Amino acid sequence: MHAPFPPNHGPGTKDQGPVDPISLPLHDQFMHFTLTPEQLAFQQAARRFARETVAPLAAAIDERDEFPADLVKAAGARGLMGVTIPTAWGGAGRDYVSYALALEEIARASATLAVILVVNNSLVSEPLLRFGSEDQKRTWLPRLASGERVGAFALSEEDAGTDAANQQTAAASLPGGGFRLTGRKTWVTCAAAADLVLVFAGEAGQTGKRAVSAFLVPMNARGVVRGARNESMGVRGLGGIDLELADVDVGADALVGARGAGFEMARWAFEGARIGIAAQAIGIGQVAFDEARAHAKRRHTFGKPIATYEAIQFMLADSATELDAARMLTLKAASTKDAQDQCGVEAAMAKLYASEAATHATDRAMQILASAGYRRGSILERLYRDVRAAEIYPGTSEVQRMIISGAVLRK
């Protein structure tokens, strides 16, 4: 994999070392991708797993809205629950490009399993690897990366989603050390089946970003109450529930990173998650496109395939172009994350464009398939429901535009 922004930017340009990509005009940002044999092999292995094991179960996962525990374990056995976690900690030791490639393949079979992988990889295991203590990593990382244990991420509340610093869940210091966590978290993906949850809470009596800390909480801890399952329109089977933290006492060793560093930890984790959801969206959109193309060739009206009509051709052309552009933006973001510590703008661009491109592709596919796609139980009907969430989590399209415009206007 070549670096996303080579130091030499054209004929006669003097090499001045690494360049901040956001400081460059758009036309000066260069990217050259050559996938390595290792990246291609990981992608192909994910594709085989998706086609042979995941795809046959996808409709049942959606219909029953059940967390696919057996599939999660099978994914863990193939390195997909800890893709970027070093082998020393039980992970696959892969780069972010490999991660994005694999997630697209999994999402082509099941959007639900792809999201579970994003949560366990980007929102739990990677923050633990980067910010956790040696004891925390030793205790949890090998189990999370193998799929033996499942992690959940509890940040959102009724009034703390986009406004993540507005945490009403409180962390009060206990005499002699430790903390008491009190509050309610909403839409906690994987929590119905998780063994561990990364909880974000504000310091009691304080407000703002610097008041937020993160804590590792076993789901069997006293005071952790699982609420009712969240009924969702699509991406069913995520095990998403609300969590009540009713005076949950944890030791000082439950704190992840420094006190008051939780907001920055969540922001950093979201960068990886947005790349993952971009890849997930592309997988959904690609399947919708494939369904539309096949139907257009097969379906005849007035004695000829509907693929011969310009209106259908233009819809397919737009979807193919947008999905390919989304894929390149996603690989660019993944490559940037491999090359440098932060990739907030790149991740936001990828997530914004990929989620909307996938929505457009799925909508066009529904128009092309018409009643064949609109029928309850069709593949496209499931994709149509699944794709909508990609513009909402983690961070809505409006949030991504805020991140991008903020970076543009700072220059």
Image (cartoon, helix red, strand yellow):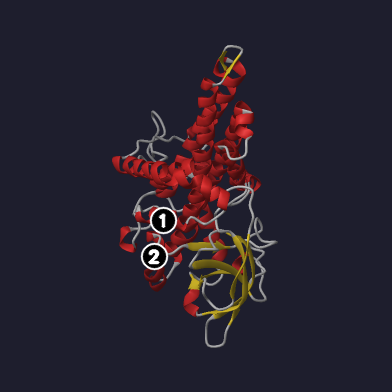
Per the image, label 1 sits on a secondary structure element best described as: loop
Residue pictured at 33% horizontal, 61% vertical: 90
Q: Dividing the picture into quarters, in which one does residue 387 lie?
A: top right
Give the camera-side residue of 171 and 336.
171
Residue at the (43%, 50%) spot, across then down: 340
What label sits on residue 143 in the rendered view?
A: 2
- The numbered mark at residue 81 is 1
The CA span between labels 2 and 1 is 10 Å
Residue 318 shows in this picture: yes
Q: Residue 170: x and y, percent?
A: 63, 73
Q: Badge 1: how crowded within 10 Å, few (<14), some, or many (20+)?
A: many
Amino acid carrying mark 1 in the image: Met
Q: Nearer the viewer, residue 10 or 126?
A: 126
Task: Classify 182 as above or below 399.
Answer: below
Q: Position of residue 361 (x, y in %)?
A: 58, 32
- Residue at the far top in the pictured view: 303
